[in-house]
Structures are given as structure tokens and as C-alpha cells.
């Protein structure tokens, strides 16, 4: 209780009044300072709320004040014992219990004040973490010989567990991958950063695909909680021949959209990473011909639900690809995200959204 008023409350106050010109206020007459401090705190606090919550807060404050006025019984002379004298002073009178209600309201305001300061401070830290997380991922369109690739991701919360990578190799080939850590939020984001760092380190060792994922799986088992696992589609793309060597560790089958408009699903795969230390993985092959495109995506795309509980599903993804009428990676990726948003409508998306498009001209 002591820390509540000696540490927590001052910290919350400093958070909301950050940037306040204290020197200017100190030059004001003493009787105006408390009013300036109170006004600035109230304004800065309310402006940190969203518009809808700000309106709800204003509703609560106004109705509290109106209720206090209705409980007001006027001003009456009240005897006050000022030792050694007695005096009759005109003081406001209220319905019995009004003071208790007002003190309860003030206590609730103080509690909300400190809780919102903590949450906003945490949100600011998470936004920095999101910037760091996004900086780890390649941005924009990557030119890969006669091919182009672009990945897009959008977390359900401030940070997320989805990731993608486009990593050129010294021999001219390119690694393209999309992964999804079980869960979302900060725990998934931490594990995502761990996996991406380990994977890029193993790539530098020159391991072939299946062996790399086996090594990656061992590290994930050893350094992550037992309740967590990661799905990963990992492929090496030959920019000269269009040959794709891939290993699928429990991830959703990517779609290849052929030039003639047909779709092909890459269904071959193995178990997700982080489940068993002795898991083994096999590599498979596919071919991208000129005019083809491969679309990698996370389950947040196909499992996005609308208000009626209907999922976007792979059929929605296929229809979006056909309707887009282009294999330009960034344009097609944004069309997929827009289609998911349109499908979800007012429903809150419960998972991260990630899509990576690799197209051969």
C-alpha cells in the first residue's frame, strides 16, 4: 500500500505528464498551479483513450457530477468546534452516503489511472519490439533473376509469431520460407526471433535442406517450452531453372498457380518443428515454369472467420488469386490480405496473417 502512493502513482503521473513545461507552470501564482496540473493531467489522460472509450469515460464523469448535484441539499449553518471557540459556518450539506460514493469514485479513477498507464507503457514497448521484429524480415520486392518475390505479414496483436524469409545464397539460389509459431503475441514473437536466428546460422553452414531442418528441430526442442511447436515451409529456389527443392515441416501446403490458370498443391511434408527431438525430414521437388507463381501462407489466412463463423478457407484464397489477375508479388500479396479483411468484416482476426508470393516472369 505504501508503494501504491509513493511509487506507482507518481510513476503513472510522470507517464501522462511527460513533456509538460514544469518551469513555466512554476512561474504561475501558487493558487493556479494545482488547477493547471490537474487540467493537464485530465486532458492528457483522456486523450490517450480511444475515441469510443473517451466518450464512455466522459459519460461516467458527467453522470457522476449530475448525481452529486442531485444529492446536494443546499448550504446550512453548521456548528464547528474551533477550540477554544465554537463557530457557526455555512457549509454544503449532502444526502448521507454521498461522501462515501464520491470517495469510491475517486478510488476507481486512481485505479484506472494507474492501470492505463501500465498498459500504455507496455504497449509502447511492444511497438518498439514490433519494429525490431519487422526489421528482421526482408521488405519490398526482391528481384531474383527472372523471378520476383515479396512477403507481407500482419500480426493479430502488436507482435506475432508468423515470419517469412527471402535469403539469397552465394551460388545464386534463393531460400524462401514461411513459418508459424503456435500461439500469438509476445511468447510467439520471442520464439520466432529465436528460430529465424538459428535458421540463418545453419544456412551459413551450407547444410542441405532436410539436414538443416533436422538440426533446426533439435535446437527448437532444446530451447523452447514443450507446449510450443513451429510449422515451417523451407525451400531453395534455383533462379536459372525454376527448380524448387522444399521441405515442409507441418506447414499448410503452398499453392502453385500455373500460367494456364490451374492450381497445384505441394502436399508432401513432415512433422512440425519442436515436437520430437529425433524427427527426420525429407526434401521434395517442384518446378516453376515461366508465368507460374507459388503462394506461401500461414493458417491465419485460410482460418480467418467472418461474423457468421465461416472460414476464408483455401477456396477463398484460390478465388482471390484468380480475381487478382496478376502474379506481381506485392500486388497479389496485398490483394490476399485485403480479401481476408473483407471476408472477416467486423469480426476480430484471431491469428497472424502472412503471405509470400514468388513468381517467375
Image: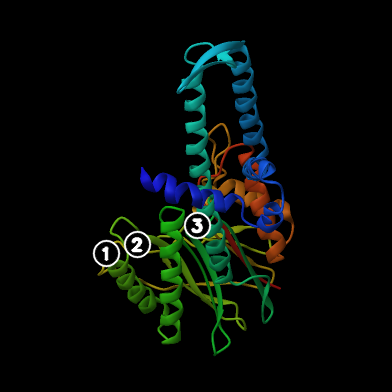
Q: Residue at x 37, y 45 (%)?
A: 2
Give the numbered dot on residue 160: 3
The answer for how far apart the CA atoms under marks 1 and 3 are is 24 Å
Eyeballing the image, is 107 above or below 179?
above
Contact, CB < 8 Å: mark 2 with mark 1?
Answer: yes
* Residue tagged 2: 271
Q: Secondary structure at mark 1?
A: loop
| Residue 195 at least partly seen | yes
Residue 176 picture location, percent across and down: 54, 72
Mark 3 / mark 2, whichever is N-terminal: 3
Earlier residue among tags 1 and 3: 3
Identify the residue at horizontal 41%, vertical 73% (top origin): 283
| Discs 2/1, front | 1
Residue closest to the eye, 31 or 343? 31
Q: Secondary structure at mark 3?
A: loop
37 with respect to 209 (left or right)? right
Q: Residues within 10 Å of mark 1 (few under 14, many from 20)?
A: some
Give the CA distance from mark 2 to mark 1.
Answer: 9 Å
Within 10 Å of disc 3 (Cα), the crowding (few <14, some 14-19, many 20+) is many
Q: Which residue is mark 1?
A: 276
Asked whether the residues under the numbered discs 3 and 2 touch, taking CB atoms below 8 Å apart as contact, a structural biologist would say: no
Amino acid at each position: 500500500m505504501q508503494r501504491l502512493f509513493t511509487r506507482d502513482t507518481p510513476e503513472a503521473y510522470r507517464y501522462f505528464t511527460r513533456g509538460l513545461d514544469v518551469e513555466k507552470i512554476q512561474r504561475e501564482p501558487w493558487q493556479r498551479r494545482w488547477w493547471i496540473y490537474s487540467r493537464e493531467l485530465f486532458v492528457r489522460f483522456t486523450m490517450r483513450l480511444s475515441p469510443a472509450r473517451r466518450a464512455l469515460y466522459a459519460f461516467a464523469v458527467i453522470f457522476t457530477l449530475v448525481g452529486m448535484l442531485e444529492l446536494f441539499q443546499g448550504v446550512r449553518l453548521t456548528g464547528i468546534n474551533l477550540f477554544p471557540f465554537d463557530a457557526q459556518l455555512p457549509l454544503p450539506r449532502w444526502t448521507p452516503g454521498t461522501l462515501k460514493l464520491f470517495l469510491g469514485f475517486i478510488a476507481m479513477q486512481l485505479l484506472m489511472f494507474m492501470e492505463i498507464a501500465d498498459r500504455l507503457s507496455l504497449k509502447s514497448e511492444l511497438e518498439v519490439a514490433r519494429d525490431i521484429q519487422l526489421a528482421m524480415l526482408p521488405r519490398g520486392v526482391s528481384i531474383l533473376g527472372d523471378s520476383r518475390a515479396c512477403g507481407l505479414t500482419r500480426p493479430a496483436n502488436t507482435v506475432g509469431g508468423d515470419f517469412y524469409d527471402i535469403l539469397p545464397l552465394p551460388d545464386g539460389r534463393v531460400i524462401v520460407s514461411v513459418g508459424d509459431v503456435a500461439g500469438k503475441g509476445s511468447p510467439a514473437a520471442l520464439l520466432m526471433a529465436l528460430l529465424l536466428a538459428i535458421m540463418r546460422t545453419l544456412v551459413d553452414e551450407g547444410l542441405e535442406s532436410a539436414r538443416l531442418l533436422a538440426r533446426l528441430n533439435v535446437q527448437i526442442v532444446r530451447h523452447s517450452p514443450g507446449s510450443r511447436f513451429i510449422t515451417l515451409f523451407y525451400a531453395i529456389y534455383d533462379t536459372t531453372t525454376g527448380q524448387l527443392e522444399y521441405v515442409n515441416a507441418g506447414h499448410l501446403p503452398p499453392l502453385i498457380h500455373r500460367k494456364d490458370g490451374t492450381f497445384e498443391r505441394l502436399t508432401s511434408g513432415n512433422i512440425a518443428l519442436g515436437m520430437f527431438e529425433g524427427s527426420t525430414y525429407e526434401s521434395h521437388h517442384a518446378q516453376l515454369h515461366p508465368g507460374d507463381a507459388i503462394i506461401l501462407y500461414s493458417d491465419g489466412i485460410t482460418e480467418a472467420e467472418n461474423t457468421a463463423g465461416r472460414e476464408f478457407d483455401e477456396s477463398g484464397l484460390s478465388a482471390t488469386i484468380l480475381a487478382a489477375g496478376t502474379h506481381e508479388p506485392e500486388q497479389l500479396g496485398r490483394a490476399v490480405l485485403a480479401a481476408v479483411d473483407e471476408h472477416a468484416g467486423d469480426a476480430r482476426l484471431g491469428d497472424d496473417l502472412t503471405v509470400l508470393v514468388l513468381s517467375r516472369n
